[in-house]
Amino acid sequence: MLQQFSPIRTAIILLVTVVGIVLGIPNFFSKETTANWPSFLPHDGMTLGLDLQGGSHLLLQVNRESIITERLKNLRRDARQILAGQNGIGNIITTDADGITVELTDPAQKDAARTALDAMQTNIASTLGVGGTPELEFGETPDGKLTIKLTPNGVTERMSSLIAQSMEVIRKRVDEVGTTEPTIQRQGQDRVLVQVPGYDDSARLKELISTTARLTFHLVHPTMSAAQAQAQGIPAGYMILPSVDSGFDELLNENVEFGGESLTNAQPAFDQQTGQSVVSFNLDTRGALIFSQITSKNVGKRFAIVLDNQVVTAPTINGPIPGGSAQITGSFTPQTANDLAVLLRAGALPATLDVVEERSVGASLGADSIRAGVIAGIVAMILVVTFMVIAYGLFGMFANISLALNIVLIVAAMSMLGATLTLPGIAGIVLTIGMAVDANVLIYERIREEMKAGKSILAAIDAGFSRAWGTIIDSHLTQLIAAIVLYFMGAGPVQGFAVTLALGILTSLFTSYTVTLYFVGWWFRLRRPKTLKIQVFRFIPDGTKIPFMKISRYAIIFSILISLGAIGSAFTKGFNLGIDFIGGSAIEVQYAGTGTPDAGTIRESLDELNLGEVQVQQFGPPTDYLVRIQLQPGGDAEQQQAVTKVTERLAEVQYEVRKTEAVSGTVSGELTTKGVIAVLVAMVAILIYVWFRFEWQFALAAITTTAHDVIMTIGLYSFVGLEFNITSIAAVLTLVGLSLNETVVISDRIRENLRKYKKMSLPELIDLSINQTIVRTSLTQFTILLALFPLVFFGGEAIRGFTIAMTFGSIFGMYSSVFIGGPILIYFGLKARSDAPADNKPAKEKRADGASV
């Protein structure tokens, strides 16, 4: 293998290195600088997530009930117009939950009425796309009344169509605010994701985006008030709406004289007589003509301006208003007038959008997160690089060069893909630092083993790389499976972690094997050594004969007791569930005063708000606190009011908001379901892969030990009280991949020894296999811990629970692979291969000089 190292491979490595550096360079310069670079150079780097650069995140969902309500209102008006207005057919229309019922004053006109109403289906179906699902279903009640029902599939298809229209309106509104590079994406059939970097006023952004801003103009009933209509019955064709101007209800004609679609411009202004803030608007030609005709025909009558089913103002028409210009008056401030003008210019949302998830991060907190991630990465890099040099000397330097290239390639790949780097994503890169050298450890330890077996230096190096490759592939693929599941089942920053982890796994296959092989081959051809000492410092002596199978009896009892304790804690004590799973709001604040911060002061000031359970806990430095508010019973509006009350009250006691998160009950339930499914899918996928690569006994043993590690880790969350949130699912899924590292290495050696030693008892063979691999499994686990510990101590409070769980789980993964996996193989009836040689003990090993050892 070393002698066949062709110049083509050298060229490939150099090309990949140069391309990686070129693609990664833009990340170290400002966009203003890269904009002036030549066109053949890349200009864009990675995109920083909102948790790193600050900004707002909103997940909006179309309100299905509002669509049905609005559609039924229009359907009733259209049916009345078709029957009475166009065909002179008297009717009484009542509205049901999903349709309307038409009672004819003259039953003899039923056929004519049915024919007239059938035309509505043709007009509506054509708007739902070619071959669209019919939206209306016509029928008849037993007593002869005509019915028109909305079909469920038709409503769903209309929702899908409205989402696309809503995205365009949202984009216009966000652009009006003047923010840069907003992300507006569709999620599923009925949701829109909006992320606006650098804009941390999520309350105002939510108001701008989720407000429907449907502007309509209606005539007020000339003689009857809303109170009289409520007492005597609402006249046909009229409706009652609240008025924010007078404080009373108004009785309005259902017919929309004209709507906001006729507006060409809207601007905030001040009334010349009163000096109050108003919104002036201009109409297009058609709207100006209609406006002039209406005001000419209805002098002395009141004309209501309605915004989102609320009467903003209902002035009396004093005379014709030509020219198509007017103004909206009300209780406006300069900012609310400006916001309303923005909404009117961008156009109305075609449907009501509910905010089901809200997150905002201040710029200062984002800068702190970047600083914490960089420090953790630097410390991890120093520890791993130092360890590899101490353990393997020159060969450790080869591994470190490959490690540096691996990080460059991760950054380059993320830049090329336009991926978003989040704080968990930084954690994924740091974790990759520890995982990337695992393959080097496996290769180097295999070379040492081949040297002991008496092979020449060249043959040992070739055998070390070739024989370790299968184990490397197995361990990396199990981790990759977990990362893929995490990406598709996770959301937001967790997906960023999955991306960096998956890219790191793929790039490390190239760097730790191909690049390291290149440097080893280059060194060998240059030096032609007579002796080879790979490991400079031995952390564990060779030739251990630890009776693992005897010790495992006690280990299994210990594991059973601890597992029962973990399960018992989960059922009795429960979990400290984050808002991702139970809904509610979380507000991270920092003390900005001159005194001493105190959680008791925060609790006392918030108890007066009567918001239910409010939790206050220190979060990182002594000046930072996390305030959690339970899900409010009044829905999203009440939840936002609660957040506003809390932030205002905390400002009074000198605490400034750094981050807010709000999750609805709908999203929290979905995240819980997704989390459970993700863990199960990952374990089943790994079970299938290990079963395919080894035998069914190995697969069941791997899943059993992995389940053991998952139970231990989840038990830690319950027992210690760490917050269990969406990143906890990421920790568990990552652990599923990591805990199999040692299991795969040991299983691979057991399978190899089964071919060699036919007559050796299975407990002896498993003991031999574990002792043969204990050095490499211990060292690979140690390098991962060297990457995890800096994340625990320097990575920041936001991911501390995540990193503590992975550290704890990794340690238990090593324990279970060594002490639990072997007995399970025996229990499942693993047997020696029938085609194996009849050896009953391992052959004596030899040193490189040929002497037996």
Image (tube, grey):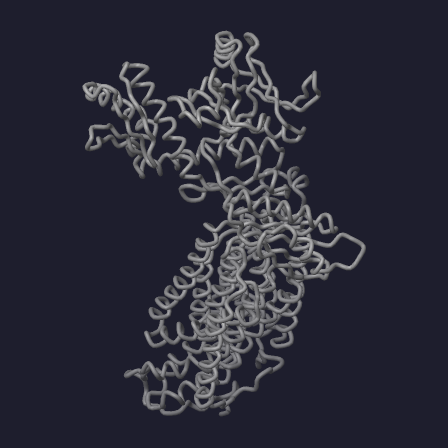
On the image, the x and y values in percent for residue 625 come to: 67, 58
Q: Height in image: 63 above or below 762?
A: above
What is the residue that sits farthest to the right in this orientation? 594
> In this rendering, is residue 111 above or below 810?
above
Pinpoint residue 726: horizontal percent, then vertical percent: 51, 58
**829 left or right of 314 in image:** left
Q: What residue is shown at x 48% (from left), y 26% (from top)?
A: 227
Q: Considering depth in this image, is 819 or 80 the residue closer to the camera? A: 80
Residue drawn at x 62%, y 65% as measured from the top left: 791
Q: Position of residue 495 (x, y in %)?
A: 50, 54
- Report if residue 499 is visible in the image: no
Query: In this view of the protein, which residue sits in the foreground, 398 or 690?
Result: 690
Q: Residue at x 45, y 44 (%)?
A: 187
Q: Using residue 753 as the reference point, say whether residue 365 is left or right of it.
A: right
Residue 4: x %, y % from top left:
47, 66
| Image mark count | 0
Q: Is residue 214 left or right of residue 534?
A: left
Q: Examine the rendering and report whether any part of residue 665 can be seen.
A: yes
- Rendered residue at 63%/75% (across/down): 393
